[in-house]
Image: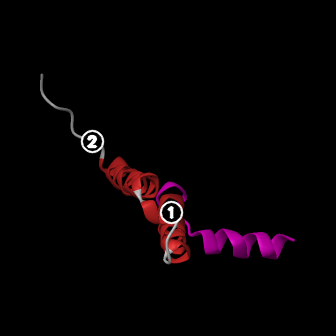
Amino acid sequence: MPQQQMRPEFRSLVEIERRLRAVIEQIRTSEERREGPDVVQFWTEQLALISQLTQELFREVTGETIDHLIEEWNRRT
């Protein structure tokens, strides 16, 4: 059975998902998340990665940036 080609518009979404799962796995398996002198730095870095991936996902799905959405919201309110 021939392997189906992934539609090009989904490749970037799959890559974002893969990267997000890697961050989640890092959080699950890391001892730094619970204790140690670098716990704040660990969580700051992980949350920054999640934020970046969320912004990339939003841009891929909507074609716009989150900043643009915030600007539009601010104009309307």
Judged left or right of residue 5, residue 26 is: right
Secondary structure type for disc 2? loop
Secondary structure type for disc 1? helix
Residue 3 position in % (x across, y down): 16, 31
Residue found 30% across the figure and 44% down from its top: 7
**Quarter location, residue 15:** bottom left
Highlighted range, magenta: 60-77
Judged left or right of residue 15, residue 39 is: right
> In the orientation shown, which residue stands out farthest toward the left?
1
Q: Looking at the picture, which amino acid does disc 2 mark?
A: Met
Q: How many marks?
A: 2
Residue found 55% across the figure and 58% down from its top: 62
**Residue 3 is a magenta residue:** no
Residue 60 position in % (x across, y down): 46, 59
Which disc, if any, is residue 33? 1
Q: Looking at the picture, which amino acid does disc 1 mark?
A: Arg
The quarter in which the C terminus is drawn is bottom right
**Quarter location, residue 66:** bottom right
Residue found 53% across the figure and 62% down from its top: 34
Q: Main secondary structure of the magenta part?
A: helix
Q: CA distance from mark 1 to mark 2?
A: 36 Å
Question: Reading the chain from its start, which is encountered first: label 1 or label 2?
Answer: 2
Q: Nearer the viewer, mark 1 or mark 2?
A: 1
**Residue 71 is a magenta residue:** yes
Judged left or right of residue 23, residue 51 is: right
Mark 1 Cα shell of 10 Å, populated few (<14), some (14-19), many (≥20) = some
Residue denoted by label 2:
6
Residue 41 position in % (x across, y down): 51, 77
> In the orientation shown, which residue stands out farthest toward the top?
1
